[in-house]
Image (tube, helix red, strand yellow):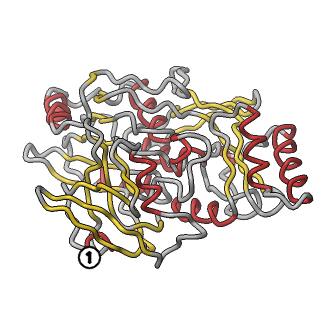
Amino acid sequence: MSGRDLFCQPRRVRHGAALALVFASVLVAGGVTGSLPGTGPEPEPDAARPAAPAGRHDEVARAAAEALADGKSPEEAAERAVSRSGDRWGAVYSHGEYEELEEALDGRYTGVGLSARRESDGRIEVTGVRTGSPAADAGIREGDRLRSVDGERVDGRPVTEVVAILRGDAEEEPAGTSVRLGLERGTRAWSETVRRASLSTDPVTVRTLATGDTVIRVLSFSKGVGAQVRDAVRRLPSGTGVVLDLRGNSGGLVSEAVTAASAFLDGGLVATYDVDGDQRALHAESGGETTRPLVALVDGGTMSAAELLTGALQDRGRAVVIGSRTFGKGSVQMPSRLPGGSVAELTVGHYRTPAGRGVDGRGITPDLEVDPAKPAALERARTVLSGLGPTA
């Protein structure tokens, strides 16, 4: 599994590794914004923000209020209430943490500019260095091994936790604070102290293969990504095949995933979802290119909004899905403000693919299973793509 320091929670992991992923708990039905009701743009008519179950939100708010009155931490009390509720995806954020989460949805984040993955032997390898980032200025390169962060050994730890440490706490370790990295390159071992910085993401990259086909890699569905995917597809020559690389895509805004689906579908159903028994649907826009050969490449880090897109393309026979089973995050969260200024997000519903398959806890099974971590995965995708002619 790979990770970029945008996608990890800038705080300690409170509810398990899954909640270390920034986007894992911010998908609202329709996904127009991660803001609280009344604090951000209004949802589109067909993507209204769900009404949360009053009982559960009231219980969490009451626990926070009682703790605040007793001079205790309202966040910790709220976290205990969420934990007791059995809500797998429930989470509590401080005011600063939630602001940083919303910045991530805008394509901004605090970090050092490293992407990383954990190898089969548990080692953490640098898989990318953002140009102009603190990591790049320090001379860190792709392929270097990350041995420690601020003196803590990272071998064997989930990459989400490692990157969360790199990012630091949203309130105590903002941009400008330093972090010491222990590194290894071949036989050389050394330390670098770098300062965290406010960075922006490049969530969509497009490159042309030697075969003439195109790889469109999408790292997240932050604001504007759907239009980037759609515009990239429209600029391609007629008949050019596409590998839609969603490996490590930790999700984001559902509306952006629906827009991306509209690049390949001529309208029709993308997903359905329920909010306390109220059934709703998400539809692609008309005008997408339905005959262009398409392969979707996924792995265990493909989550939430990325799984919705994958499921829609698979169910509607639009793409061949290659890789390994996706993460399995298909629930709808609703945020609400708590006493003391923190924010709680509780699950209020679940998504289903056009064929009615539930995603949460199951994931999407690829049509062709291959090891997505190996370079051969992309080669296999190219081979499958070469066998796909224009679809009817």
Q: Is 287 positioned to the left or the right of 186 in the image?
A: right
Q: Which residue is painted at 77% across and 63% down in the image?
A: 341
Residue type at mark 1 is Asp
Q: Position of residue 104 (x, y in %)?
A: 51, 61
Q: Quadrant of residue 119?
A: top left
Q: Quadrant of residue 302?
A: top left
Which of these two is toward me, 22 or 290?
22
Q: Residue furthest left?
A: 210
**What is the count of numbered marks?**
1
Quarter occupied by the C terminus: top left
Q: Which residue is mark 1?
A: 137
Residue 89 position (above or below residue 72)? above
Q: Is 158 positioned to the left or the right of 253 in the image?
A: left
Q: Which residue is painted at 89% across and 48% down in the image?
A: 62
Q: Is 217 positioned to the left or the right of 8 in the image?
A: left
Q: Secondary structure at mark 1?
A: helix
Q: Position of residue 111 (x, y in %)?
A: 42, 66
Quarter occupied by the N terminus: top left
Q: Is 215 positioned to the left or the right of 349 in the image?
A: left
Q: Position of residue 294 (x, y in %)?
A: 27, 35
Which of these two is toward me, 259 or 53?
53
Other residues around mark 1 within 10 Å, as few (<14) / some (14–19) / many (≥20): some
Q: Which residue is painted at 21% across and 72% down in the image?
A: 139
Q: Position of residue 143 (x, y in %)?
A: 18, 54
Q: Which residue is painted at 75% across and 42% down in the image?
A: 80
